[in-house]
Amino acid sequence: MRLLFYIILTFFTWTVSAATIDVENIRIWAAPENTRIVLDLSGPIDHELTKLNDPFRAVVDISNARLKNDLSQPVDADRYLRRLRSANHEDDLRVVLDLKKFAIVKSFQLEPNKTYGYRLVIDLSSDDNQETDVIDENTKSIDEILAPRDVVIAIDAGHGGEDPGSIGPSGTYEKDIALILAKKLVAKINQVHGMKAVLIREGDYYVRLRDRIDKARKHNADLFVSVHADAFTDPRVSGSSVYVLSQKGASSEHAKWLAAKENASDLIGGVKLEDKDDVLASVLLDLSQTASLEASIDVADKILAGLKSVGKLHKRRVESAAFAVLKSPDIPSVLVETAYISNPGEEKKLRSPSHQEALTSALLAGLEAYFRFNPPDNSIISQYRSLEYVISRGDTLSDIASRHRVSLSSLRQANGLASDKIRIGQKLIIPLSGS
């Protein structure tokens, strides 16, 4: 009887292990710096990755698998991938990636999450990912170095590619809303004299959190703003929130940077770490990160005030959390949850072009309010006189806006005003732009 049991158990185990896995879908995400191919699977797999030259290609052999649908193909603009091919050999599936040039090819499996099932991920990249538009100071002339510069703001659209973020009741993807808002905000910032915006994610692809920070640093960003749309299990929850890095998160990040200082090529306050002893490096990091956190809280307050003029705030104060995307020790960073996409009413608003305009105008007003009184040294904005107006008897908000050639809405947003009601002695910030 025991022998029969083991025979049945062995047969059952062999049957399960030999079950055919379906490759249900193949998704291709082409980014400027890399291409990611994601195979959606009906279960875990055994696979082997082989890289070949002349011509360049990568071969993925998957045991006990079959392709359920036709192969997807890359767009012409894909930097690495020319086409995909497939073939079956007995019970195994072979997927061939024909490449346009040499690429570093890596693969790994992901277990199911709330959005996707099992996945095989193949990443294509190259050594020239370190491309940057930043010009070394040694190549600049004295006049170029001393010339007033734009304030640089890195605008990061959260999620992207195979990471949709939160999904609204009507199927709206957070990644799509974040990109729309980021692009609109970048356009508005670039219309302000003395301000320049850099878009971290330009299309529907995923950028690793650390790479987002690195890209901002390569552009010498003075501020990093990550745009999101929150979600919660209760669809009634609503409102905007602004986050900075928590002290706990800052502490853990400080330790990581210090541990990796020998390999650090980044600058902390303009000082390299790799040639400093642990004590000095720790002090430099602490000073840099403390200043960065203080600036982050200040700009977050101004952004929150701007958002107050658009709609409900989820919390009336700046919140803190250990978001990885906020952990740059040398760049003030904030994360904006523009609304709760899980709330049907707010999801509808987030899809509305007029509300998108109002949101991005409010964000711009907050940024202007911060940089008006905290301009970086040698910036064009630092040459402006910080405009602060004190309300006198007889003043109206519309008169003040007209007198300073700014719109009434931008004046409201810069000061977090929900109405035109003002009082004698109240101080108003006059925004940089008149939009």
Image (cartoon, grey):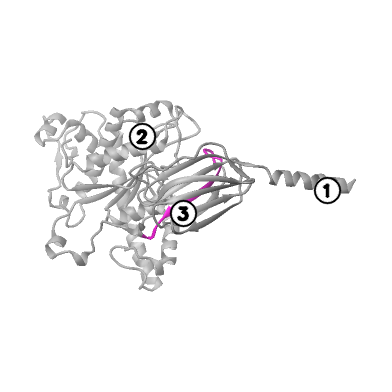
Quadrant in the picture for the N terminus: top right
Look at the image and give the residue range highlighted in magenta: 113-127
The percent coordinates of residue 371 (x first, y second) are 22, 48
Q: CA distance from mark 3 to mark 1?
A: 45 Å
For residue 36, above or below residue 329:
above
Q: Earlier in the sequence, mark 3 or mark 1?
A: 1
- Check if mark 3's residue and mark 1's residue have beta carbons within 8 Å: no
Question: Is residue 38 at least partly visible in the picture?
Answer: yes
Tell me the quarter of the picture where residue 281 sits.
bottom left
Q: Residues within 10 Å of mark 1 (few under 14, many from 20)?
A: few
Q: Earlier in the sequence, mark 3 or mark 2?
A: 3
Q: Is residue 126 magenta?
A: yes
Instruction: Tell me which residue sits at (47%, 49%) in the image.
Output: 97
**Residue 6: assigned label:** 1
Relative to 389, 71 lies left or right: right
Relative to 63, 127 lies left or right: left
Residue type at tag 3:
Arg
Residue type at tag 2:
Leu
Q: Is residue 72 magenta?
A: no
Q: Which residue is mark 3?
A: 57
Of marks 3 and 1, the one in the foreground:
3
Residue extending farthest to the front is 54
Q: Which residue is mark 2?
A: 313
